[in-house]
Image: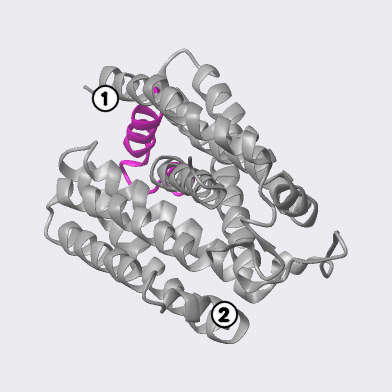
Amino acid sequence: MISTELLVNITAAAALFGLMAYGVFGGADFGGGVWDLFAAGPRRKEQRLAIQKAMGPVWEANHVWLIFVVVVLFTCFPRAYSKLAIALFVPFHLALVGIMLRGASFVFRSYQSQQAEEAAETSLWGIVFGVASIISPVLLGAAFGVVTEGLIRVKNGEVQAQPWFWLTPYAIANGLLALTTCAYLAAVYLTNETKGELREDFRWRAILAGTGTAALALLVLALAWFEARWFVDRMLSPQALPVVIAGLVCFAASAWAVFNRHFILSRLFAAAEICMLILGWGLAQHPFLVYPDLTFAATAAPRATLYFLVLTLPVGALLLLPSLFYLFRVFKS
């Protein structure tokens, strides 16, 4: 008989896995939109075409992971999910608007002309696509900052939060860190999708975004020391620190690979970095879903619901993972 505590941890781990997958795949898509907006130089049209070619066949499939995370949260931790949805109503919905706008604008821009080269020119839909690609990761990163800062309080079942509490310096710094991380991930991926001078364009963008990511990571750490000290202490705990260090090593290795033009290695290390850092955050956050008032155990759904979801996870994985693998294989081969 599986204990209820184990069921809670398995479902929480499933949601964390979904976040990791969304960070690796969806984060690169957001970053692609950033570089589409800031395409510059004599090869700006070729840059946009490379981004469109890389994203076009598979970009919408990446949001499957976000949907998966949301479904797991509202099914297995409904009370915590409802409190998060209430407290973060504005940033969550603005991020959702950004996701919908970037999707619609990407499609409209693709069909606004009969030739892909014409669609790669600067246009209103292209600007909307780029701006929306900036807004969504910033807001999602800010929401992460709010959760780790402990600004969402629940007293007697009611959410208590200050107006515009998701715009604190720490939350904004987390949002900007999420943005530069997405930009770095996309630039690294695009060095593997291009050749020659175009590859060098994205290599320099990866160096720029990586430098910004490192600087913002230091800023976030400094702000966390004063605004989210509990989270810093948890990140330095024995259960989370080895994973965080592994993530930092992967980031350094990815940067080294970019500098030395080992593009396949840079891509592998960049993806591993995202996974390790999100895993480290999850280990540090546990047992709190929303610090300090909502734990996973206290907000979990009835045992029967958790048990049913755990039993269906392997079935869903057998359907989803091969399908996604085949999708990428068909359009990326």
Q: Residues within 10 Å of mark 2 (few under 14, many from 20)?
A: some
On residue 332, the disc is: 1
Q: Left or right: 196 with respect to 32?
A: left
**Going by the picture, which residue comes out furthest to the front?**
1
Say which of marks 1 and 2 sits in front: 2
- Point out residue 37 in the picture as x, y percentages from the top left corner: 49, 45
Q: Left or right: 206 with respect to 304?
A: left
Residue marked by disc 2: 230
On whether residue 56 falls in the magenta region, the answer is yes
Residue 286 shows up from this direction: yes
Magenta-drawn segment: 32-57
Residue 126 shows up from this direction: no
Q: Quadrant of residue 210?
A: bottom left
Q: Residue at x 56, y 35 (%)?
A: 307
Establish if 86 lies above or below 99. Answer: below
- Point out residue 71 in the picture as x, y percentages from the top left corner: 61, 35
Q: CA distance from mark 1 to mark 2?
A: 43 Å
What amino acid type is highlighted by mark number 1? Answer: Lys
1 or 2: tag closer to the N-terminus = 2
